[in-house]
Amino acid sequence: MPGREFLGKPRLPFDDLARRSAPARAATDALPAVRAARRRGAQTSQPAAVAARRAQMLARVQAAGFTSIPDAVRRTAHLTRNAAAERIGVGRTTVTRWRARYTRGGERA
């Protein structure tokens, strides 16, 4: 078919958005409609992500033989953070954060 070579691949709307410069996209950040849309998205996606991560961590803790995160912190308090992280199945930073959260100022639910 003559002329087909000029058509090329059809473009999708997000292709056009991806080609815009960062300053051009940033110019819309202050628009009330954009801020409202992002706020609505954050109100649903952020709590869901936090809940999913918490459930994942609790599953790891339970798979390691503990009943809860505070239980894991209590029962691994005698270990170094490296050894505790290996025993629980999480990272060292997570153990450090949990120890700070669940040992200072009382236990948190």
Image (tube, grey):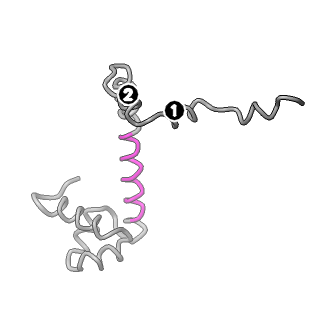
- Report the residue marked by disc 2: 40
Amino acid carrying label 1: it is Leu
Q: Position of residue 21 (x, y in %)?
A: 44, 35
Q: Which residues are magenta?
A: 46-60
Q: Earlier in the sequence, mark 1 or mark 2?
A: 1
Q: Position of residue 29 (x, y in %)?
A: 34, 28
Q: Position of residue 72 (x, y in %)?
A: 29, 68
Q: Residues within 10 Å of mark 2 (few under 14, many from 20)?
A: few
At a point 35% along the width and 76% down the height, the residue shown is 87
Q: For mark 1, give the secondary structure.
A: helix
Tell me: 81 left or right of 13: left
Amino acid carrying label 2: it is Arg
- Report the residue marked by disc 1: 17
- Mark 1 → mark 2, Cα distance in angstroms: 21 Å
Nearer the camera: disc 1 or disc 2:
1
Q: For mark 2, give the secondary structure.
A: helix
Q: Quadrant of residue 32?
A: top left
Look at the image and say whether residue 51 sits in the magenta stretch.
yes
Q: Quadrant of residue 4?
A: top right
Q: Are marks 1 and 2 in contact (CB under 8 Å)?
A: no
Q: Is residue 51 above or below residue 70?
A: above
